[in-house]
Amino acid sequence: MYGTLDISTSGLIAQRTRLEAISANIANSRVILDADGNLNPYKRREVFFAPGDPSAATPAGRALGVHVAAIEANEDAVRFEPDPSNPFADERGMVPYPDIDPVMEQVSAMEAIRAYEANITVAEATKSMMAQALRLIA
């Protein structure tokens, strides 16, 4: 039964990481400057999962669950908007902005929250079964 807790825990961690990336995307959806003040639009972050949990204590546990395989910045996620009065506009009057759709990010966030809740439900059910098993033994 501990394997079931490991699986749901790895899912919780993965979905939390995904939600953090989504939050960063929404928060930076209009950021066009980097930390040094140079024109460098924020790049949308994407989280990729892979099967297995490398942090599990046992070899069997490492084959179960899920983990974050990578968090990558989408270098092509830039759109241009006309704004000739912007000091960062190019010669055509276009300003590069992150190509982040807040509605799609919200949908992804809702999906991540639902997956997180499902993992919590599994962990609670596992805990309840373990408690019942201990009551039967005692």
Image (tube, rainbow, N blue to C red):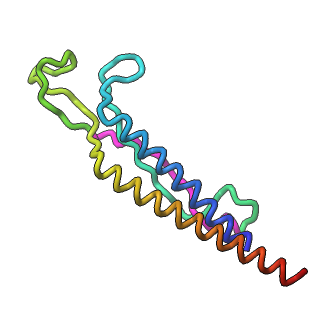
Question: Which residue shows up at 15% across the image and 21% down it?
Answer: 90
How many circles with numbers are drawn on the protein? 0
Residue 116 in magenta stretch: no
User: Which of these two is toward me, 77 or 25?
Assistant: 25
Residue 72 relative to residue 38: left or right:
right
Q: Give the range drawn in magenta.
A: 61-77
User: In the current view of this chain or complex, which residue is farthest to the left?
Assistant: 92
Question: Which residue shows up at 33% across the image and 18% down it?
Answer: 38
Where residue 106 sits in the image (x, y, percent)? 35, 51
User: Which of these two is toward me, 66 or 25?
Assistant: 25
Q: Quadrant of residue 53?
A: bottom right
Residue 24 relative to residue 67: left or right:
left
Question: Which residue shows up at 25% across the image and 37% down it?
Answer: 78
Residue 80 relative to residue 34: left or right:
left
Figure check: 117 above or below 68: below
Where residue 59 sits in the image (x, y, percent)? 72, 66
Q: In which quarter of the image is residue 107?
A: bottom left
User: In the current view of this chain or complex, which residue is farthest to the right?
Assistant: 138
User: Which of these two is toward me, 55 or 102?
Assistant: 102
> For the C terminus, which image quadrant?
bottom right
Where residue 39 sits in the image (x, y, percent)? 30, 22
> For the N terminus, which image quadrant?
bottom right
Residue 68 in magenta stretch: yes
Figure check: 138 above or below 25: below
Where residue 124 sits in the image (x, y, percent)? 65, 68
Question: Which residue shows up at 63% across the image and 66% down it?
Answer: 7
